Amino acid sequence: MRDNYTEGKTFEKTDFTAEKFIQGEYEDCNFISCNLSGINLSNSRFTDCTFQDCNMGNAKLGGTTINNITFKGCKVLGLHFGDCDSFLFSANFYDCILNYCSFFKVPLKATTFKNCQIHEADFSQADLTSATFDNCDLTKTLFDKSILEKTDFRSAYNYSINPENNRMKKAKFSVQGVAGLLDKYGIEISQ
């Protein structure tokens, strides 16, 4: 734990590119309309916090603890969540742009992704057991050796998943989305 401990504070419209971000432990804090783009959040701890309408593009997450965090309406571009401390990792994402993010080997059991744009992200070797992709655009997102058991893709779209390279027992798909499971075969499906 770092020397700086902050509990129950709201940071609103704070530009951390101009005002120094203090690494430390943040519990039950709200970050609203903040600019954290490119900021080094490494080795900080976030517990029971909410990030709403924040720009977090290319923030550094080495050793960062993310425990019960909610991201709402955030630009989360290019973050490497695999660099976070995986112990107790838990987050949910609503109305976020998660393009180019890496979730390599991240434990994402029961994580909710709702109304998110997730282009060219990497979920390789991630554990997405019982996760939900509700109305998410997964264009060019990679699932390789991922655990997708009981994962709900029923309203997700633009995904391409190879069932032979992923554990997918009881994963849920809509009839319209089944084509995304057949891409590797290069076949054409028409309605």
Image (spheres, rainbow, N blue to C red):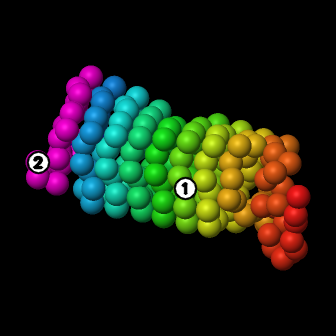
Q: Is residue 124 magenta?
A: no
Q: Nearer the viewer, residue 125 or 33?
A: 33
Q: Position of residue 164 (x, y in %)?
A: 84, 66
At x 64%, y 40%, the residue is 134
Q: Position of residue 159 (x, y in %)?
A: 69, 59
Residue at screen point 30% across, 30% down: 30
Which residue does the image show at 48% across and 41% down from the upper left? 95
Which stretch did the figure color magenta? 4-24
Which residue is tagged 1?
118
68 w.r.t. 40: above or below: above
Q: Nearer the viewer, residue 104 or 112?
A: 112
The reply to whether residue 154 is in sight is yes
User: Number of labelled discs?
Assistant: 2
Q: Secondary structure at mark 2?
A: loop
- The verdict on residue 17 being magenta is yes
Mark 1: which amino acid? Ile
State the separation of the CA atoms marked 1 and 2: 29 Å
Q: Mark 2 — residue?
A: 19
Q: Quadrant of residue 150?
A: top right
Q: Residue at x 27, y 56 (%)?
A: 37
